[in-house]
Image (spheres, coloured by chain):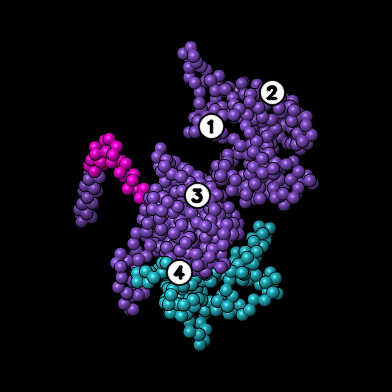
Chain colours: A purple, B cyan
């Protein structure tokens, strides 16, 4: 829900307010459900959105209002939006509810608008986890025959697509929950074993079940990118992050650890003005003229992002003071030393030698390791400094699933308020957290030291939970049984492939000589 | 083009097919040298422009283009609070554009044509290669391939962090 909440908020809609209530689903269960029912007031005059798609033939609704399905199509995690006409626990309940709705004044009005002779239609049956034959599906359709549609049935691209969804109980991984045998050890027929916990009937808004949206997402897939690195963020997650950050046209976004620019690209696709900084000049420059950050943007016809080589650890050293905030959003994936080392400028020596004047221009400064604790502290401080009031910081941090408290172990800052913390798991123990924060207080230059020392509530202990993940993983892997054997096999494989390469090189060399 | 008596020579390339990265005047307006030596006067950074590039604004006359223009204008309006005007005028002239008025008046802020031109100056004029110099300490920051290099030397770093 977090993504949906952020996107709705961007359009002035507050989830769980009287303007947008969340209704309870039929059959209460403990599990999370893949559906959400929202209730809006019928008269949307003055609001920024309307429920009708496309051109509006109805005077009561504003032409400037954005169709609700356009708003929702931003959400990567939402599959479709349906205007609900009837709901119930079983098919009969749903049919009865739809009949009642059809007789209500609101229902009559909506039905009138969508059942004209010029409006073709079809009903799709979508059953979660159960399979029904064509005949069974048609019988379900016939139950809704009291809806007197005047237009023609059209299977491909009708004006209105209606859908009946039969929901069965599913577990957290998306698999259907069902007993295979009953108390007499007899095998239960699948459909009977998966009783409905909800049946919904309604009209699909937008361009169908956002399958087209999925197709649109394909073009942004990393597979098609000109310039990639080992830590390029996948397209889906970057877009989700832009939703958390409420990035839209005309906003200014920065990524202080831009790398190959994959997150920045998603922000630009949303229409924002983008800039990125990084300490590593090689990654900013790219591999060649046709393989760099700029070529990724060119691939999609987007304006060039602003790139600066600078060290985020000393952001305040090179940029405008905090009296005038610069950015609407900061969306980033900081380095935490697992796949890409985190570095900042500086020498390992206590008092480094100053560089001789003549060599200053060409001198490449040393970098030293940059601990995760400091990376996060500097990031939060820089965000508090440069965000406009209400602007958002969205970042990703790897952490373990257990033994982690959101209140105590996430970095904190007086000027920033935590909005969301969402967990994505990789394995049963390890995952990453996508954190969204909002600027709620003005930054006072004189308090910088206080801010920085208060970032980790439990001091080094909390920072440790996010740091050195690579070492922890390696240690845990070593303890597992069979590690030694597997490591030996891997070593042997590597040795063999290296030798094979050498042999083939030698062969080519001799061929060249002969040739 | 060459300017007689000018200290700088620079090349202006209108459209290039290679993917060169850039630094805009908007970015220059935010860059500072906040070192202890600069004593609060590390702004604006002087520009020695070796290679400048001006993109042609891609204006479409249809609805979409007009919408885009409106958005650009409101974007620029929003920036006006943040910009240091005199720094911008100086930087623009160092890059070869002398047409900016020295003072930002109420009338100018309301003039849509002016705002559109200002958007062009801020977003389409790029420094591809050059040097940024701190006016107080003389510390130079190179700009190569459009990327300003703000990385400090080791001895400068130690004093920068609080």
* Residue topped by disc 4: A317
Chain letter for the residue marked with disc 2 in the picture: A
Residue A273 pos. (x, y %): 56, 60
Q: Are marks 2 and 1 in contact (CB under 8 Å)?
A: no
Left/right of residue A9 with respect to residue A176 in the rendered view = right
Which x, y percent locates residue A201?
66, 30
- Indicate the chain on which mark 4 is placed: A
Where does the image place residue A152, in percent across and percent down from the top left?
72, 31
Q: Main secondary structure of the magenta part?
A: helix
Q: Quadrant of residue A317?
A: bottom left
What kind of element bears circle 2? loop
Horizontally, is A252 left or right of A467 in the view? right
- The kind of secondary structure element at disc 4 is helix
**Does residue A484 belong to the magenta stretch?**
yes
The residue at the point 58 percent across, 80 percent down is: B98
| CA gap, disc 4 and disc 2 | 70 Å
Q: Which residue is mark 1?
A: A31
Please tell me whether mark 1 sits on a helix, a strand or a loop. Answer: loop
Sooner in the amino-acid sequence: mark 2 or mark 1: 1
Q: Which region is colored magenta?
A: A467-492
Residue extending furthest bottom? B5
Labels 4 and 3 touching (C-beta < 8 A): no
Q: Which residue is mark 2?
A: A143
Name the residue nearer the viewer: B14 or B28.
Answer: B28
Distance between the alpha carbons at the discs numbered 2 and 3: 46 Å
Give yes or no for contact between labels 1 and 3 (Cβ–Cβ under 8 Å). no
Disc 3: which chain?
A
Residue found at the very far top of the displayed protein? A184
């Amino acid at each position: 829900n977090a993504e949906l909440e952020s996107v709705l908020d961007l359009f002035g809609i507050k989830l769980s307010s009287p303007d947008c209530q969340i209704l309870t689903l039929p059959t209460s269960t403990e599990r999370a459900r893949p559906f959400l029912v929202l209730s809006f007031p019928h008269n949307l005059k003055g609001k920024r959105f309307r429920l009708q798609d496309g051109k509006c033939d109805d005077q009561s609704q504003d032409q400037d209002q954005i169709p609700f399905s356009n708003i929702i199509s931003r959400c990567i995690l939402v599959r479709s939006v349906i205007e609900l006409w009837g709901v119930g626990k079983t098919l009969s309940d749903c049919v009865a509810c739809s009949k009642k709705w059809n007789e209500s004044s609101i229902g009559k009005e909506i039905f009138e608008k969508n059942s004209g002779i010029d409006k073709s239609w079809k009903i799709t049956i979508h059953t979660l986890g159960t399979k029904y034959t064509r005949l069974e599906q048609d019988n379900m359709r016939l139950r809704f025959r009291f809806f007197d549609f005047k237009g023609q049935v059209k299977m491909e691209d009708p004006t209105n697509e209606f859908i009946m969804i039969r929901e069965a109980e599913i577990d957290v991984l998306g698999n259907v929950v069902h007993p295979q045998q009953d108390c007499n050890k007899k095998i239960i027929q699948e459909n009977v074993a998966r009783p409905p916990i909800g049946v919904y009937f309604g009209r699909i808004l937008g361009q169908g079940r956002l399958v087209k949206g999925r197709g649109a997402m394909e073009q942004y897939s990393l597979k098609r990118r000109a310039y990639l690195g080992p830590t390029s963020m996948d397209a889906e997650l970057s877009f989700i992050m832009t939703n958390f950050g409420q990035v839209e046209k005309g906003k200014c976004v920065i990524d202080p650890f831009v790398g190959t620019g994959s997150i920045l690209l998603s922000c630009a696709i949303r229409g924002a003005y983008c800039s990125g900084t990084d300490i590593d000049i090689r990654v900013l420059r790219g591999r060649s003229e046709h393989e760099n950050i700029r070529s990724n943007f060119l691939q999609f016809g987007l304006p060039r992002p602003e790139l600066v080589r600078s060290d985020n650890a000393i952001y305040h050293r090179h940029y405008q003071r905090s009296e005038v905030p610069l950015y609407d959003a900061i969306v980033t994936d900081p380095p935490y030393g697992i796949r890409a080392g985190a570095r900042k400028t500086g020498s390992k020596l206590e008092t480094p030698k100053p560089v001789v004047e003549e060599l200053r221009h060409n001198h490449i400064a040393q970098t030293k390791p940059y601990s995760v604790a400091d990376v996060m502290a500097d990031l939060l401080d820089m965000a508090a400094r440069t965000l406009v009031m209400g602007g958002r910081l969205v970042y990703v941090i790897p952490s373990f699933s257990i033994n982690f408290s959101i209140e105590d172990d996430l970095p904190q800052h007086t000027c920033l308020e935590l909005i969301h913390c969402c967990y994505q798991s990789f394995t049963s123990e390890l995952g990453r957290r996508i954190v969204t924060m909002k600027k709620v207080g003005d930054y006072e230059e004189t308090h910088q030291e206080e801010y920085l020392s208060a970032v980790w509530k439990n001091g080094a202990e909390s920072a440790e939970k996010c740091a050195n993940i690579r070492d922890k993983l390696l240690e845990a892997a070593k303890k597992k049984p069979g590690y030694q054997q597997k490591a030996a096999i891997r070593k042997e494989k590597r040795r063999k492939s290296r030798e094979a390469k050498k042999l083939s090189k030698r062969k080519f060399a001799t061929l060249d000589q002969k040739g | 083009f060459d300017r007689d008596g000018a200290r700088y020579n620079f090349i202006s390339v209108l459209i290039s097919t290679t993917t060169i990265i850039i630094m805009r005047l908007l970015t220059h307006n935010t860059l500072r040298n906040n070192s202890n030596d600069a004593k609060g006067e590390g702004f604006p950074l002087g520009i020695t422009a070796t290679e400048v590039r001006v993109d042609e604004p891609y204006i479409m006359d249809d609805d979409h283009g007009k919408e885009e223009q409106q958005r650009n204008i409101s974007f620029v309006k929003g920036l006006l609070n943040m910009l240091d005007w005199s720094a911008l005028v100086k930087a623009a002239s160092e890059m070869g554009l002398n047409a900016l008025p020295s003072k930002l008046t109420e009338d100018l802020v309301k003039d849509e044509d002016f705002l559109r031109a200002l958007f062009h100056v801020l977003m389409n004029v790029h420094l591809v290669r050059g040097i940024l110099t701190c006016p107080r300490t003389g510390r130079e920051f190179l700009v190569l391939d459009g990327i300003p290099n703000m990385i400090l030397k080791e001895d400068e770093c130690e004093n920068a962090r609080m």
